Every structure is written in C-alpha cells, then in structure tokens.
C-alpha cells in the first residue's frame, strides 16, 4: 500500500499512515491516517510525505513507550473502583431478594467457596486469562485505551483483579453470615483515598460529537469548528478521556496557535473559547469535574482589542479607483465571479459567501419585483451564517441596469445550477478565491490598509443606508441581521413583509458615480 497517492477526485496528493493495531484506540479505532499534502507535484509530495512519516513515527513511538503504560496509582484506583461497584451490586441484590433461608445461604456459601478456590488456583498457576474480558471492560468503562494483552501492564491488571476478586469473595462470604465490619469498608476506601482516580468518562472526540449534536449551528460554522477541535486532539497526542486532558495540554495548544500557526490574538481566543465551550458543556452533562482547563488561558479582551483590525468602508474615491480600474472591468468577460460578486456585495449589501454560493434558482420574481432568495441547500452546499440570514432581498436597480439578470439567463440556458459554477467550495467557502483576488486588486490601486477588504463593501452599504434614512428594521432585514429587540424577534414575521417595502429601502443606497463607470464598460 503506497504511502503517497493521488486522490482521484481532488487531484492532489495525500499521505497515508497505517496505525498499529495496539495504538488504534488512541485514534478512535482508525486503521489509517490520511493527510492532504496540498500539492499536485509528485516530487514535492514525496518530500512532504517523508516529513510526515517522521512526525507520525515519533508520535507512535511516544504512545508505545508511554501511552499504554499504567501507573500503580491508576491500576489501584481502577481495581478499587471495580471492587466497590461489585460489592454495592451484590448488596443491592441481597436487599431486593428479601428473606434468605438456611438452605439458600448454604448454597451461596458453596458457590463463593468454589469461586474462591478457582481464583486461588489461577493465581498459583499464573493463569489469569479468564480475567481478560473483565479487564477490557473495566478499561473501556473508565474511558481508557485498551492495553496490549501480551504486555506486562495488562498482565499486572489481570492479576490485581484476581486478588481483588479474592477480597470480594471473602467479604461477601462474611456478609452472608451477617458480619459487616468497619475493616471491610476501609479495605475499599484505603486504596481509593491514597490513589488519584484514573481518567474516566468518554473520549474527547465522542463528547465533541455529542456537543455538536445537542448545540446545533449552521453547517458553515459547525464543520470548521469540528475540524479545529480535532486539530486540538491531534496536537495533544491523540484522543483521550476528557478527564485526562490537563491545563498543560491546553497551554501547549495555545502556544501552538500563537507560535506555530502565527494566528492573531482574536483567532487564538476564538479557538480556545471553542475548546472551553466543550469542557463547560461536558461539565454540565457530568462527563468531567473540576475547573475547566481552558480557564484563564485566553488572551485578555484588552489585548485582543489592541491587535484587532477593524473594517472600515471604502471612501467614494477608493471605490472609483477599484471599480473603475481596467483590471476589474476586464473580469466581466474573463472571470464573471470576480466581477459580479463584488458588485452584488456593493449594491445588495450581501455577505461574500451569500453572493458566491447563489444558485440560478435563487434569482426569482414576485409581482414584477426580481429578488434573491438567500437560503440553505444541502445538495448545492449552500449555508447561512445564522437564522436571520435566511431572507428575500430585492435586486437593486443598478444591478439590473448592469445586466445582472441577463447574466442569470445565460447561466440558466447553459444548464448551470449555480451562478458562479467555476467556483468550488473549500474550507473557507466558495468565495475565498474571489476575496483574495479582490484584496490584491485593492492593494494594486494604492490602497494599503488592512482594514479595507471585500467585506468593507457591506460595511459601507449598511452605513450609507442608515445615513440615507432607511428604517432600522428594514436595514436589518436587508442585511440579514437578527433583530435587536423582542418586538423584532418575536412579533415581526419577516417573510410577510412586502418586497415593495424592502425595495423602497434598498433603493436609498446610491453609488451613482460607480454605476456610471461600470455602465460605460457594460454598454460601450
């Protein structure tokens, strides 16, 4: 099986690592690990694959040396827990069964005696194979990875369980004779009080799945969130029970975000908050106990505000320089997405992704008013930022003048389902390539300001609408923002608002000078 292979659909090389069977529990049972090498060049892929092979082998070596070893404290805590549970279950059964005759008690005593003899013989002959299934079940219930049955750690655990079984049988025999001594209760508690509890509970990845299922969010935010949470797992050395993840692990993740990935303070805080949210939710569900290990690690809001780049609108002069540039105007015939997506963001104040993922069927007409139906669609992989983003927005008259509806008709006649069918959906959505190209275009026009990007068109449009006297609630609906008060959230049903009223509000947005420049190119 080759280590490097070309993905048949994605046209890029991937690295494949085979996970040793004994280590598969650390990777949620996966037999193979795949990683995109992000290149179509085989030589470059081979080099990158060699680097990944070295990293993966180091990880496997660490897990083999340390990951599958148990400390004496862990083993004693596990066995003490097993003994306590077994004694409690036996006591419950004795209580529920009611009256026990002499014959019944004598029969129980013989069974306990036979089991005691079998346990003693197993210890003497070093035959603890009958305890393997019980040892595996104990590890699984504690959320710990399975141990190698041929390893010394597993043998020690089985032998320790045999000793605990002898203790259980002795205590049970005494209890059936009515002997409940304080020494019996202490025999369980002494080990438990001196040894810390072994890591218990479900694996982090399992809790993540439950967390995402019970706290649903839009697909466009849920997918990258899960990807980042799995990156966290990978960085700390593989999947493990929630209670086994320490503050040191979380600090390592923070340093990785800042130093290795060179992320901003704001993005780092966002990722740390996501991991912290999982632990907070897990605590409420009873999966973990104690302080959230993420607590106190996130950068302060003051530091984030200092570093954060706030978006600002384009000035009128900057808009003319960008939209009037020859490079932008040429895109109309060569790269339609680069032309129409910024124009849609300018006149219809859509988000970049809302414009980029538009389907031909999303351009509709009602009573002579053409409009965009912004919605979700699993087949076309359309997603929305939030519930308020689902809306109908009249198409601005400037877009109609520029021939947007003609472009839609052309795509429909060509049989395309999506308006910008050349765009493919990546980790950052359909519109990421357009956003990056637009950023380069802005820089070429001499506008060197990190606060000015494609999204600035939306900032500017909403500001202009507000300044032109567009009612606040109409502006919210056009922009796809959630209502700010109970009146708008509960009592206003947006789907019933007439398109004519929304169009009246949108038409207050005017970019007449930009429209003139664009019209000259559209209708020479």
Image (tube, rainbow, N blue to C red):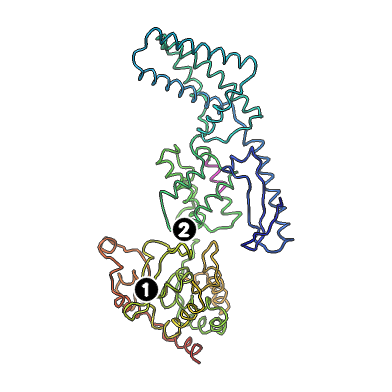
Residue nearest the observer in this picture, 429 or 301: 429
Q: Please tell me the numbered disc located at residue 393.
A: 1
Residues drawn in magenta: 246-254
Give the residue displayed 42% in from the left and 56% down from the top: 217
Q: Using residue 349 as the reference point, say whether residue 244 is left or right of it.
A: right
Give the residue displayed 54% in from the left and 13% down from the top: 116
Give the residue displayed 51% in from the left and 21% down from the top: 191
- Residue 237, image x, y percentages: 60, 43
Mark 1, Cα crowd under 10 Å, few <14 / some 14-19 / many 20+, is many
Q: Please tell me the numbered disc located at residue 221.
A: 2
* Label 1 element class: strand
- Residue 371, image x, y percentages: 38, 76
* Label 2 element class: helix
Residue at the far right in the pictured view: 43
As drawn, 217 above or below 80? below
Give the residue displayed 34% in from the left and 13% down from the top: 99
Secondary structure predominantly adopted by residues drawn in magenta = helix
| Residue 216 located within the stretch drawn in magenta | no
């Amino acid at each position: 099986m080759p280590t490097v292979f070309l993905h048949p659909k994605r046209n890029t090389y991937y690295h494949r690592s085979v996970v040793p069977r004994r280590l598969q529990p650390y990777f949620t049972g996966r037999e193979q690990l795949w990683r995109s090498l992000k290149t179509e060049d085989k030589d470059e892929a081979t080099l990158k694959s060699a680097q990944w092979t070295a990293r993966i082998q180091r990880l496997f070596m660490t897990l083999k040396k340390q990951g599958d070893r148990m400390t004496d404290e862990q083993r004693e805590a596990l066995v003490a827990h097993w003994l306590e549970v077994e004694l409690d279950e036996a006591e419950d059964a004795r209580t529920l069964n009611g009256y026990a005759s002499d014959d019944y008690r004598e029969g129980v005593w013989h069974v306990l005696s036979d089991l005691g003899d079998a346990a003693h013989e197993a210890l003497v002959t070093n035959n603890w194979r009958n305890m393997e299934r019980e040892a595996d079940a104990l590890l699984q219930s504690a959320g710990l990875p399975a141990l190698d049955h041929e390893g010394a750690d597993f043998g020690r655990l089985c032998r320790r369980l045999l000793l605990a079984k002898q203790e259980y049988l002795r205590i049970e025999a005494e209890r059936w004779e009515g002997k409940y001594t304080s020494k019996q209760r202490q025999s369980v508690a002494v080990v438990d009080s001196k040894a810390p509890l072994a890591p218990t509970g479900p694996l982090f990845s399992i809790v993540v799945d439950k967390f995402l299922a019970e706290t649903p969010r839009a697909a466009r935010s849920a997918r990258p969130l899960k990807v980042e949470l799995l990156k966290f797992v990978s960085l700390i050395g593989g999947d493990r029970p929630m209670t086994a993840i320490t503050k040191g692990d979380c600090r390592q993740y923070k340093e990785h975000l800042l130093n290795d990935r060179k992320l901003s303070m704001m993005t780092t805080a966002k990722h740390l908050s996501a991991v912290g949210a999982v632990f907070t939710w897990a605590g409420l569900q009873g999966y973990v106990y104690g302080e959230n290990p993420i607590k106190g690690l996130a950068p302060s809001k003051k530091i984030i505000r200092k570093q954060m780049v706030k978006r600002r609108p384009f000035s009128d002069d900057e808009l003319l320089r960008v939209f009037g540039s020859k490079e932008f105007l040429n895109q109309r015939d060569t790269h339609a997405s680069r032309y129409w997506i910024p124009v849609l963001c300018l006149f219809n104040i859509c988000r970049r992704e809302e414009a980029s993922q538009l389907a031909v069927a999303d351009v509709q007409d009602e009573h002579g008013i053409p409009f965009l139906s912004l919605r979700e669609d699993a087949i076309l992989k359309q997603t929305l930022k939030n519930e308020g983003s689902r809306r109908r927005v009249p198409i601005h008259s400037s877009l109609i003048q520029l021939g947007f509806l003609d472009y839609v008709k052309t795509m429909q006649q060509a049989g395309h389902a999506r308006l910008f069918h050349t765009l493919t959906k990546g980790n950052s959505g359909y519109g990421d390539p357009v956003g990056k190209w637009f950023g380069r275009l802005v820089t070429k026009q001499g506008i060197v300001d990190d606060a000015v990007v494609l999204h600035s068109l939306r900032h500017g449009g909403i500001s202009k609408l507000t300044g032109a006297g567009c009612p606040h609630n109409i502006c919210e609906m056009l922009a796809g923002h959630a209502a700010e008060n109970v009146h708008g959230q509960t009592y206003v049903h947006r789907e019933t608002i007439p398109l004519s009223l929304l169009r009246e509000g949108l038409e207050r947005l005017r970019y007449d000078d930009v429209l003139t420049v664009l019209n000259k190119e559209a209708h020479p």
